[in-house]
């Protein structure tokens, strides 16, 4: 059984790593870097088994039980012709006369048609197939029982049943909001990049709503977190979220660029510095980044992992620091860099 999962573009390999770690074995997979999609051949015996397994995944956003995969051309007639030959037998037993259905479509590449055309054409094919089997399913675009995903990526055409009811990045521990919350899929992947051991300490120098330590608490139960933010309201929100996540943590209100941080020592510093909008400091942003990175490098015994949309500022602050790796990702239509610095 094949499953299509979506993730943050640039983190596809971390999806595979998490699946293989949880299953304890290698799994077949196909993905293009920066596509945000991974096709898994994980050997799930049923859709329910796949749904149960994927519900606990932290590196994915959505998942689809694949019904059909093939190629489609760029013209409208190509799409219409391909839709007529879709293999939709997997819908039997899932869509019934008592259920409602809807099609959501994603399209990327050069095509004569838009994503709305893909949704309409595939939707017509689904309804025709079900009616041919005596099933009069209802169409409900606002709150359907069954969501069918149609993905057209260049010439690749995949259609599947969505098995994540809402996006998997909606976390149960988020009882308090934050105006610039880090996507938890990214936060979890950053912790994977640090690769903490049991008993390690993680420090988030600009914790905001506490997403990074909350993700650590969810999976690495023996890891302790130290959370610092200059804004007391954010620290309060982080505390609420971390309590909901069941984390072992310390909170401190303070400026992570100041000398007061120098006595701090932890195994890993993992953080998402502000881009300037929510900075409560009179310092120029270049100075802010320089002092923040210097304190992070000073505090970490093993690794520093930092994500930023201001790549040049971080590169300038890191200087000639050894063992630096950089990963580019896309979030919200913008590119960011995740730097991992391993201490000697």
Image (cartoon, rainbow, N blue to C red):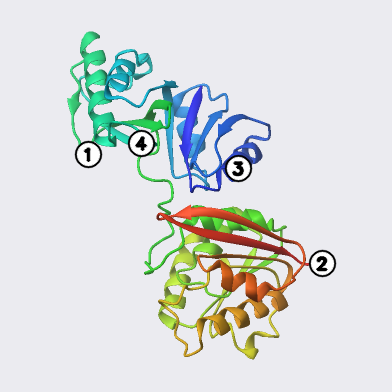
The crowd level at tag 4 (other Cα within 10 Å; few <14, some 14-19, many 20+) is: many
Quadrant of the snapshot with the C terminus? bottom right
Across and down, in percent, residue 223 comes to 65, 62
Graded by Cα atoms within 10 Å as few (under 14), some (14 to 19) or many (20 or more), the crowding at tag 2 reads few
Which circle marks residue 344 in the picture?
2
Is residue 324 in view? yes
Residue position for label 3: 13
Marks 1/2 in contact by CB < 8 Å: the verdict is no
- Of tags 4 and 3, which is closer to the observer? 4
Under circle 1, the secondary element is loop
Are dots 2 and 3 in contact, CB under 8 Å? no
Q: Which residue is mark 4?
A: 107
- Tell me if 250 is positioned left or right of 64 in this view: right
User: Could you tell me if the residues under marks 4 and 3 are in contact, i.e. CB atoms within 8 Å?
Assistant: no
Across and down, in percent, residue 159 comes to 38, 26
Give percent across and percent down for residue 282.
47, 90
Of badges 1 and 4, nearer the viewer stands 4
Residue lying furthest right: 344
Real-space Cα distance between discs 1 and 3? Answer: 32 Å
Question: Which circle, 4 or 2, is nearer the viewer?
Answer: 4
Q: Earlier in the sequence, mark 4 or mark 2?
A: 4
The answer for how far apart the CA atoms under marks 2 and 3 are is 26 Å
User: Which SS class for mark 3?
Assistant: helix
* Foreground pick, 117 / 229: 117
Q: CA distance from mark 4 to mark 2?
A: 45 Å
């Amino acid at each position: 059984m094949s499953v299509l999962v979506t993730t943050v573009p640039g983190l596809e390999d971390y999806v595979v790593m998490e699946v293989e770690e949880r299953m304890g074995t290698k799994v077949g997979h196909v993905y293009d870097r920066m596509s945000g999609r991974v096709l898994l051949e994980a050997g799930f015996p049923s859709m329910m088994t796949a749904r149960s397994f994927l519900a606990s995944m932290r590196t994915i956003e959505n998942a689809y039980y694949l019904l059909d995969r093939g190629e489609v051309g760029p013209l409208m007639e190509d799409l219409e012709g391909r839709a007529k030959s879709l293999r939709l037998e997997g819908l039997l037993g899932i869509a019934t006369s008592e259920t409602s259905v809807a099609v959501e479509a994603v399209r990327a590449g050069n095509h004569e048609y838009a994503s709305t055309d893909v949704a309409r054409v595939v939707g017509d094919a689904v309804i025709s197939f079900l009616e041919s089997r005596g099933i009069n399913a209802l169409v409900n675009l606002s709150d359907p029982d069954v969501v069918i995903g149609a993905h057209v990526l260049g010439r690749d055409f995949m259609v599947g049943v969505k098995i994540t009811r809402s996006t998997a990045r909606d976390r149960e521990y988020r009882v308090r909001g934050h105006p610039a919350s880090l996507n938890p899929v990214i936060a979890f992947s950053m912790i994977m990049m640090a690769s903490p051991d049991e008993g390690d300490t993680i420090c988030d120098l600009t914790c905001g709503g506490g997403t990074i330590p909350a993700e650590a608490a969810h999976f690495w139960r023996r890891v302790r977190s130290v959370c610092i933010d200059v804004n007391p309201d954010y620290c309060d929100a982080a505390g609420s979220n971390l309590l909901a996540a069941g984390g072992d943590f310390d909170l401190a209100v303070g400026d992570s660029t100041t000398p007061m941080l120098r006595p701090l020592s932890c195994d890993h510093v993992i953080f998402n510095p502000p881009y300037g909008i929510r900075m409560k400091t009179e310092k120029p942003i270049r100075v802010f980044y320089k002092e923040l990175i210097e304190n992070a490098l000073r505090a970490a015994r093993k690794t520093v992992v930092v994500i930023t949309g201001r790549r040049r500022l971080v590169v300038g602050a890191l200087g000639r620091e050894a063992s630096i790796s950089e990963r580019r990702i896309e979030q919200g239509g913008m590119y960011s860099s995740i730097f991992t610095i391993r201490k000697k």
